[in-house]
Structure formats: C-alpha cells, structure tokens
Amino acid sequence: MEILTILESLEDLIEKSSGVPFSGKCLVDREEVLEIVKEMRLKLPDDIKQAKWIKEERQKILLEAQKEANNILKDAENKIASLVDEHEITKKAYEQSNEIVSSAQKNAREIRLGAREYADSVLNKVEEILTDATDVIKTNRKELK
C-alpha cells in the first residue's frame, strides 16, 4: 500500500530531524511534514476504496457459495427423486445426498469464514494505518503548536 510508504517517509523525516536538547522533541521542516500529510490525504481514498472493494468481493463470494450450496442441494434432491423406485438405491441416494449437503455446507462455511477473515484482516490493516496516520498528525500538530 502506498500509504505505508508515505508513513515510512514521515517516520524517516522525524528520525533524521535534529533533537532539542534536554527534551524528547525534535525540529522538523514544516513544509516537508505538510507535504507528506498532503500526500497521505491524497492516497487515503485509494486505500478506503480498496477496503470497500474487498468488502463487496466478500459479499459476492458469500452469495456465490450460497448459490453453489443451493445448486448442490437441488441436484441432490433431483437425484433422490429419480432413485426412489428401488429401496436399496434410495437408501444409498439418501446417504450420498446427506454427504453432498454436508460437504456443501462445510465448503460454504469455510468460504464464508475465509472471506470474513480476509476482509476483517484488510479492514483491520486499513484501520491501523488510519489510526497511525491520525496519531502522527496529532503529534505533529502538538509539536507545531
């Protein structure tokens, strides 16, 4: 993500700045800091759009998984209906349909959990970046005052 690169450049600027004796403060070039903050503002919408896209993709994946599960269930029901005539075949069909349904539900659950974890991970990372950026901006504003 580009925002991480920008944050690293801000961090480098602060680390390379001259320190104020007998305090934990440093002197930074106001123009450089403001330029980095401006660049961060320009890049943040891209990261937010990416997070929104990930959320939408997660929804699509969940819907596709549900459709696939429904299709598998319908296929299983159709197969059962065609095999009802013979008892032994019917018994076997019920077993297979239960396995198919169980497998479809398991696959749908795994896909759903994976999509949620991925979306949560990305949104968490974006939240961390935004929090870090906000903290840096607040700190810089305090130092500028």
Image (tube, helix red, strand yellow):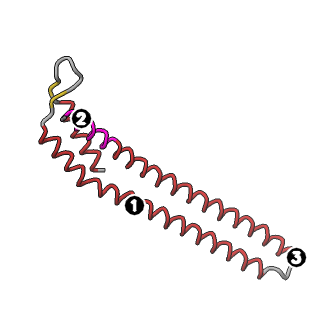
Front disc: 2 or 1: 2
Is 142 in the magenta?
Answer: yes
Specify few, some or many for label 2: CA neighbours under 10 Å numbering under 14, 14-19, or 20 or more.
few
Residue tagged 1: 52
Marks 1 and 3 sit apart, C-alpha to C-alpha, by: 52 Å
Give the structural element (helix, strand or loop) at label 3. helix
- Which amino acid, mark 1? Lys
Label count reads 3
Specify few, some or many for label 1: CA neighbours under 10 Å numbering under 14, 14-19, or 20 or more.
some
- Which amino acid, mark 2? Lys
Quarter-of-image position of residue 5: top left
Marks 2 and 3 sit apart, C-alpha to C-alpha, by: 80 Å
Marks 2 and 1 sit apart, C-alpha to C-alpha, by: 32 Å
Marked residue nearer the N-terminal end (2 or 1): 1
Residue tagged 3: 87
Q: Is residue 140 above or below residue 115?
A: above
Q: Which residues are magenta?
A: 132-144
Residue at left offset 33%, top offset 41% = 132
Q: Is residue 9 above or below residue 107?
A: above
* Image-based side of 12 in relation to 91, left or right: left
Main secondary structure along the magenta-highlighted residues: helix
Marked residue nearer the N-terminal end (2 or 3): 3
Q: Which of the pair 8/129 is nearer the observer? A: 129
**What is the x, y in percent for residue 69?**
63, 69
Q: State the quadrant of the C terminus.
A: top left
